[in-house]
Image: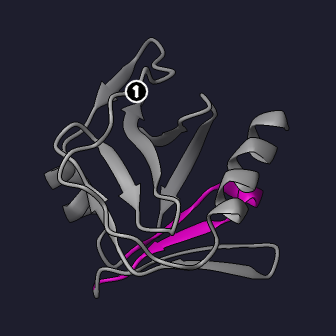
């Protein structure tokens, strides 16, 4: 439950304004676990562009084909004008306070890891 609160709070704090994601993702020590397989930005672009990712009751993110991003939870929507996937599986969401997370695959399941170490299994729709 604490991880969900950190995940949601970070998204809420991000707001709906937009900023540009830089060319390189910042260095981060991610909460990797046994079985985590790193994925490429190319893989993520192909898998997620134009799709939604549902994180149980935590919410749903949408990677719009126009390059925009939306996170929806509890009747609230948080929009960003852009998102970017990096070669190492990190993604940036262009909120006014840029947000970085890492996507991995573990046991065939897509998992997003936030900078605080929370891990969330997503289902692509």
In the rendering, at what x and y percent does residue 26 appear? 32, 37
The image's colour scheme reads: one colour
Q: Residue furthest bottom?
A: 66
Identify which residue is drawn at 29% across, 72% down.
49
Tell me if mark 1 has few (under 14), some (14-19) or many (20+) residues whose alpha carbon lies within 10 angstroms of its own: few
Give the residue displayed 42% in from the left and 28% down from the top.
107
Looking at the picture, how far across and down is residue 11, in whole percent? 65, 60
Q: Secondary structure at mark 1?
A: loop
Magenta stretch bounds: 51-65
**Residue position for label 1:** 28
Q: Nearer the viewer, residue 19 or 57?
A: 19
Q: Residue at x 51, y 56 (%)?
A: 123
Q: How many marks?
A: 1
Q: Quadrant of the N terminus?
A: top right
Q: Nearer the viewer, residue 25 or 1?
A: 25
Q: Where is residue 73 shown, x and y percent of the image?
A: 74, 71
Q: Is residue 61 magenta?
A: yes
Residue at point 35%, 74% (across, down): 82
């Amino acid at each position: 439950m604490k991880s969900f609160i950190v995940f949601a709070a970070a998204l809420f704090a991000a707001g709906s304004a937009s900023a540009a994601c830089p060319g390189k993702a910042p260095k981060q020590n991610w909460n990797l676990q046994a079985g985590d397989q790193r994925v490429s930005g190319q893989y993520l672009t192909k898998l997620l562009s134009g799709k939604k990712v549902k994180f149980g009751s935590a919410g749903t993110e949408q990677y719009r084909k126009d390059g925009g991003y939306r996170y929806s939870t509890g009747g609230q929507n948080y929009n960003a004008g852009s998102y970017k996937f990096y070669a190492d599986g990190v993604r940036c969401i262009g909120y006014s306070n840029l947000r970085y997370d890492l996507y991995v695959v573990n046991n065939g399941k897509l998992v997003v890891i936030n900078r605080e170490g929370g891990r969330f299994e997503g289902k692509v729709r």
